[in-house]
Amino acid sequence: GCGSMLYALSIPRNYDPQTPAPLVLVLHSGGERMRYYGSAFMRLLVAPALGDLRPIMIAPDCPTNSWSDAPAEEAVMALLQSVLNQFNIDRRRVLVTGFSLGGRGTWFMASRHADLFTAAIPMASSPGGLPVDSLATMPTYIIHSRDDEVSPFAQDERVAKQLMEMGRPVRFQALYGYGHYEMYRYVDALKGAGRWVVDQWRRR
């Protein structure tokens, strides 16, 4: 369970328990696992991009090989529950985002827990074998580089088109010239995605 999962928690400087704050679940990419990898990923990419939302951010270390494993899902959901119990979270503004392995995890968590998440920003990963019907039932901003040599761009683009045709609230942003391991170069795109998500939240 939660006891064995390391995580980093970021609280905005001006957090006021009287005012509900947005919550961002941050799912790190794959690759070399060090302790507090989630924290490093959050500091590298997500905090600089989404800081303007003044969210509470939680960045766990994946306890298994994939965010979509049952034990990982269970641990993440238990962790989120403890954050919801501990802080005043605006339940209409709960975002999940991640890159590569974490992008796949973002698709997975949003499809499985549409009762909790109200927006998703998957980066550099297609949803894999998840049923299309379960995808993007909430505002979903997909970011992927055409020059990604690890995670196939075309598959993600195809799913995005399919979802748009289904009338799902989806945006797809193609980046150019970024390799898979240059995730720090996604900051500006993620910042724009965050602004789009805020806009969607205001309209709902």
Image (cartoon, rainbow, N blue to C red):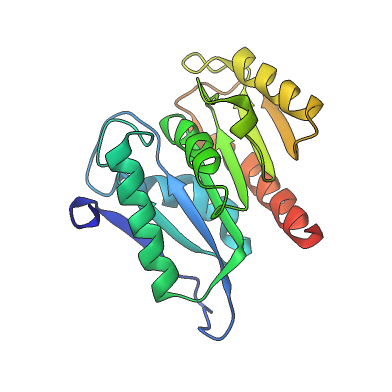
Residue extending furthest bottom? 18
Q: Say if 93 sits above or below 26 in the image.
A: below
**Residue at the (50%, 13%) spot, across then down:** 149
Rendered location of residue 82, percent (x, y): 36, 66
Q: Say if 142 sits above or below 81 in the image.
A: above
Specify whether 103 is left or right of 58. Answer: right
**Residue at the (54%, 18%) spot, across then down:** 148
Q: Is residue 176 visible?
A: no
Rendered location of residue 34, percent (x, y): 23, 40
From the viewer's side, name the closer residue of 182 and 154.
154
**Residue at the (75%, 40%) spot, across then down:** 169
Q: Is residue 126 visible?
A: yes
Rendered location of residue 85, percent (x, y): 40, 73
Specify whether 107 is left or right of 146. Answer: left
Q: Quadrant of residue 131?
A: top right
Rendered location of residue 173, percent (x, y): 71, 31
From the viewer's side, name the closer residue of 164 and 195.
164
Q: Say if 77 sits above or below 147 in the image.
A: below
**Residue at the (80%, 25%) spot, across then down:** 165
> How many numbered marks does the figure carry?
0
Q: If the image is split into quadrants, where does the C terminus sit?
A: bottom right
Specify whether 125 is left or right of 145. Answer: left
From the viewer's side, name the closer residue of 64 and 1.
1
